[in-house]
Amino acid sequence: MEEITYYKLDDIVRNNGKTTDRTWILVKTDVYDVTHYMKDHPGGSELVEEYAGKDATSAFHEAGHSSDARKQLKALKIGELHPDERGNNVKKPTSKVKSENEPPSEKNRNFLDIISCGLCGRN
């Protein structure tokens, strides 16, 4: 059985790419180090920076990611949010009905939209 590393919310906030050289995000209760992924992000690093050190759960779920995008994110997982800090501190994904073939609007575009299915590059 693999040992789980737990992080506090303060750890995630501190690793925002500004106060440390690491960039972490939180999706549900999983912590991801996206530091090296940022330079390869198809939409540019600024989309990742928007959620650096923050909870990206809603943005991730609203983007409607492909299984390939979920696999990419899974490979970046470094741990989980400490159980004592789960619950009201973590945003629940919002349900939004969206067509599979509908690209996100420019207004609602976020860094995770890009890796979802290739529709994000459409104008």
Image (spheres, grey):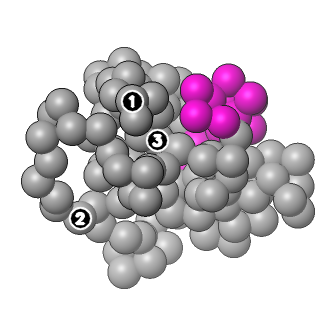
Disc 1 to disc 3, C-alpha distance? 15 Å
Give the percent coordinates (x, y) of residue 49: 68, 52
**Side of 37 relative to 69 (left or right):** right
Mark-to-mark CA distance, 2 and 1: 24 Å
Q: Residue at x 40, y 35 (%)?
A: 123
Q: Which residues are magenta?
A: 28-44
Amino acid type of the residue that numbered disc 1 sits on in the rendered structure: Arg
Q: Tag 3, which secondary structure?
A: loop
Q: Residue 105 at what x, y percent from top left?
A: 35, 50
Dot 2 corresponds to which residue?
94
Of the numbered discs 2 and 1, the one sitting upstream in the chain is 2
Classify mark 1: helix, strand or loop: loop
Q: Quadrant of residue 36?
A: top right
| Amino acid carrying mark 2 in the image | Thr
Residue at the disc numbered 1: 122
* In the rendered image, the vertical position of residue 99 relative to residue 95, given as above or below: above
The numbered mark, 1 or 3, whose residue comes first in the sequence reads 3
**Mark 3 belongs to which amino acid?**
Leu
Residue at 88% x, 62% y is 19
Provide the residue designation for mark 3. 112
Height in image: 58 above or below 111? below
Number of residues whose C-alpha sits closer than 10 Å to that of mark 2, classed few (under 14), some (14–19) or many (20 or more): few
Q: Residue at x 34, y 28 (%)?
A: 119
